[in-house]
Image (cartoon, rainbow, N blue to C red):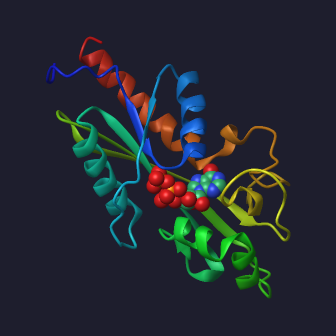
Amino acid sequence: MVGTQQLSELFFASSNEHKFQESERILSKLGIQINLFKTTLEEIQSNNLNDIAEKKAINAHDLIQKPVIIEDDGLFIDSLNGFPGPYSSYVYDTIGNKGIMNLLENSQIRDAKFVAIIAYCDDDYGVKLFESSIPGKISSIIEKGGWGHDPIFIPDGESKTYANVSDKDKFSHRAASLTKFSSWFLDMQKDNGQ
Ligand code: ITT
């Protein structure tokens, strides 16, 4: 049995309510309730999502002083050597999906992957990282609906983008990483008698 902190109260720290809503829906099906801690976290400059996620989790834990998860994502496009990757949020806010389409205008090779790192942090376990990636393609048109890069990312095996697949949670990078996190978290709670 480790520590004495109340593990059943778990926060999800993010400035992005879309991420929280999807995570809440996915985790509640897995038996885990989360609360939004809405905040803008420090993001170090790095080409490595794991490093960014680890520092974000420590920053979130310093702020809230309770068990917390954060998520860091990136859309990695093969023909752009992995761009925008860790800079996905900045690229979305600046050139947007239209800018990405322009960069790929003459490219037949549209392979890409979406990566999600979930980072958990508490006093007893420190930081734990859970990573998944989902392969797919950048669409030829920007579809309507969804948020962020949803309208341009088609997961492998589908004909529509994340914005229009029937059940995004079945394929998403977020669901895959949260599923890994949940099995560790539920086992850890069991070990701690909660
Ligand atoms: P935080 O406050 O949680 O950091 P953020 O939006 O800045 O929120 P990231 O740094 O992880 O989050 O940025 C990843 C970007 O990738 C995000 O802003 C979206 O533009 C995009 N993205 C991530 N997951 C996505 C998804 O499921 N669908 C569409 N776009 C997504």
Does the image show residue 73? no
The outermost residue toward the top is 193
Residue at image location 53% in from the left, 70% down from the top: 90
Quarter of the picture for ligand 1? bottom right
Please state the total of marks drawn on the protein image: 0
Residue 32 left/right relative to 164: left
Q: Quadrant of residue 120?
A: top left
* Residue in the foreground of this view, choosing between 166 and 16: 16
What is the x, y in percent for residue 130?
41, 45
Q: Is residue 36 above or below residue 17?
A: above
The outermost residue toward the bottom is 106
Q: Quadrant of the N terminus?
A: top left
Q: Quadrant of residue 174?
A: top right
Residue at image location 59% in from the left, 69% down from the top: 93
Q: Is residue 31 above or below residue 116?
A: above
What is the x, y in percent for residue 27?
53, 29
Residue at image location 28% in from the left, 38% down from the top: 64
Does the image show residue 146? yes
Residue 99 left/right relative to 182: right
Residue at image location 33% in from the left, 54% down from the top: 56
Q: Quadrant of the C terminus?
A: top left
What is the x, y in percent for residue 150?
71, 56
Q: Quadrant of residue 88?
A: bottom right
What is the x, y in percent for residue 145?
80, 51
